[in-house]
Image (tube, rainbow, N blue to C red):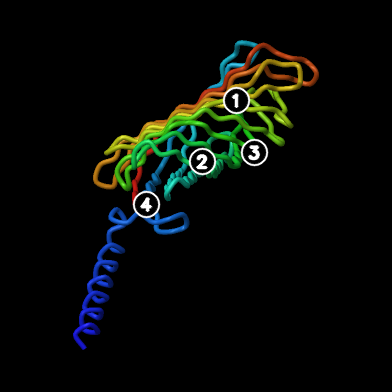
Amino acid sequence: MLVAAYVALALSKDTQAAQSDSLNPLVTPPSHGGQVVSVYAESETGLMGLVTADRGGTGEATRFASVGASLRRLGVAYDRGLVVRVSNAMELAGSERGVEGQAVADVSGGYRFHVTDDSGPFVRGGIRGILGGDALLYQSMIELPQAHLGYQYLKSKTTFIEAAARVGFSIFGRSDASGEGGRRALDQVADVGAIATLRTGPVHLSADWSHFLTRDGGSAIDWLSVSLCGTAHKLALCTDARAMLGDQHIGNVEIASGRVTQVGLTLGFAGSK
């Protein structure tokens, strides 16, 4: 009887300890496929003002302004080595030249090597898609596969810092960067670039660069984008800058390097998890 009572008491204590540990994932880290160890998610939604300027090969500058709405989201999760990153953005606006918009989606997953509980080098693979533009700028691309090699620091719900080199293969796409009708194809071309992200406190900073090694005899094409947001009490103020650089074709004639730039300001709401 005494032995049975002792065993029952020991099993009861073990059960209580296991329940207590299950409420605190840091006490007993889960295995692959278990509870998420670290996660970061944030979004900004608001009204957007955008100015687009084009300086084509003729040297003549064209610009116009548009007003609309934008939505962007970023989510990152880490689970005992496995790491996933998902980002997407949508814009819809209008101007005297008509309706314009853009949709961007980027999904990747891979493995992060352990340096500390919150950081380490990683390798990821995934897919990226872009579609949209306006009267002066048009971008479209499906990139599969793409690979990231970089370093990440992720602290659940508070901080996310990442920098990575990126290589990919554009299955098909276009890069139109001249209001005069210039066009470049991005079919079956390599993309070499980089991404960087900083999310800490009220500061949200993102940068993206793609360098397309074209096959049509023209120069390489560069896509650049930088976004900086400040948040306070669920309010967000963001400024964005984008550029498309590279030679353009009008019919069968190649014109000197074209350049389209966009500068925007968004006021809205921020969310995080």
Answer whether residue 52 is visible to the viewer in this image: no
Pick whichever of labels 4 and 2 is earlier in the sequence. 4
Q: Residues within 10 Å of mark 2 (few under 14, many from 20)?
A: many
Residue furthest toward the left? Answer: 2
The residue labelled by disc 3 is 145
Q: Give SS at disc 4.
A: loop
Residue 144 falls in which quadrant of the image? top right
Q: CA distance from mark 3 to mark 2?
A: 31 Å
Indicate the quadrant where residue 60 lies. Answer: top right
Q: Amino acid at mark 1?
A: Val
Q: Which residue is mark 2?
A: 93
Q: Position of residue 182 (x, y in %)?
A: 70, 23
Residue named by callout 1: 192
SS label for mark 3: strand
The residue that label 4 is drawn on is 37
Question: Which of labels 4 and 3 is toward the front?
Answer: 4
Question: What's under tag 4, amino acid-wise?
Answer: Val
Q: Residue at coordinates 64% horizontally, 38% vertically from top-left?
A: 145
User: Which of the image's four quarters has the N terminus?
Assistant: bottom left
